[in-house]
Image: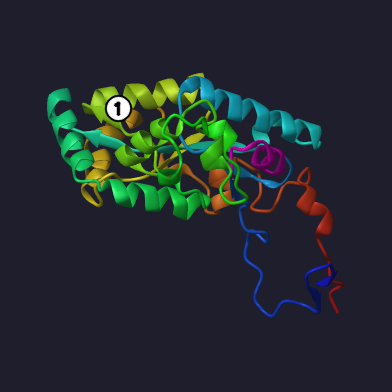
Amino acid sequence: MAHDGPYFRSHGYGNTQRSPQGTPVLFQAGASPAGREFGGKHGEAIFVGSGSVEQLRTHSSAIREEAVKNGRAAHEVKIMSAFAAVVGSTEEEARRTYAEVADAQNPEVTVASYAWFTGLDLSSYDPRTPMSELRTELSQTQVARFADKTVGDVLADWHAHGVGARPIVGTPEQVADRMMELADGADLDGFLFAPVIPPASTADFIEHVLPILKERGAIADPAAEPESLRERLMGTPTPALADSHIGSSFRRTMARV
C-alpha cells in the first residue's frame, strides 16, 4: 500500500492474509443527496432507511442514476430499506402489542435520541418550526427524511419508533404483502430487519412471515447460493470487486518469485 494524503501516509504491505473477496463488500448508508451521490459511485449495497413507496423509489432511482454516471450498470448497486414488523395472529392483536411498546416510550428519551443522531435539540424549537429551516453537519439523512415535516411531527414520529423503520403492524400475510409492495414499487433489492422487541420480533418474523415469502419465491434457497457474501448479495460471477467499480483501479499485483 502506498498512500500520501492530507490526513495520513502509509507505505508498505498489509500483514494479513487476503480473503477470497479481496475487498470487503462495500455497504454504505445514506439517503441524503450527498449520500446518494457517494453511494452511486462507491457503494455496492446501499441502505436508504425507511419510508413510503414514493420516498424509497426516489432514493433508489437517484442512486441508480449516479451509478450509471460512474460507468456502472444500474443493477450493480443493491438498495436495501430498513424494515420492522410487529406480527400477530390477528391485526387487532398486532396493533395492541405495538401500542404497548409505544406507550412505554419516554418523551425526554425521544428528544435525547434525536439529538444523539443529529446534534439538534428539538425541544428548543417551536413545534410548528419547519424542519427545512434546521441545519446540522451530523446525520443529514435524519433531517432530510423529515424535510416536509415540522419539529412537532418529527418528535411524534421519533417517539413512536425512533431512528428505526416505522413497523408494519399486522398478520403474517399483511406483513408479507407490504414487503412485496415496497420491493416492487420502490425498486428495492432487499431489507435490513430491525426488531421492535428483540428477540421476540425476530422470532415471530422467522416463524410466521419468512415461510410465506419463501412460498412466493421472494427468498432464495440458501443451499443453492455461492459461498462468498459478494456473490450471494451482488450476484457477481466471482468473489472479487467488479471491474466496473472505481475501487478496481486501485488493485495491486505482485510478481510471483
Q: Residue at x 25, y 29 (%)?
A: 169
Disc 1 crowd rating (10 Å Cα; few below 14, some 14-19, many 20+) is many
Evaluate whether residue 248 shows in this view. Answer: yes
Indicate the quadrant containing the N terminus: top left, top right, bottom left or bottom right.
bottom right
Residue, x 40% and y 45% (percent of image)?
123
- In the rendered image, is residue 47 in sight? no
Q: Name the kind of residue labelled 1 in the image.
A: Val
Residue 40, how many percent across, how many down? Answer: 70, 39
- Left or right relative to 87: residue 77: right
Numbered-mark total = 1
Closer-to-camera residue (65/50):
50
Q: Which residue is denoted by mark 1 in the rendering? A: 175
Residue 38 among magenta residues:
yes
Q: Is the magenta stretch mostly helix, strand or loop?
A: helix
Image location (x, y in percent) of residue 20: 63, 62
Numbered range of the magenta stretch:
30-40
Location of residue 139 with respect to 187 vertically, above or below:
below
Q: Does the magenta stretch include residue 199?
A: no
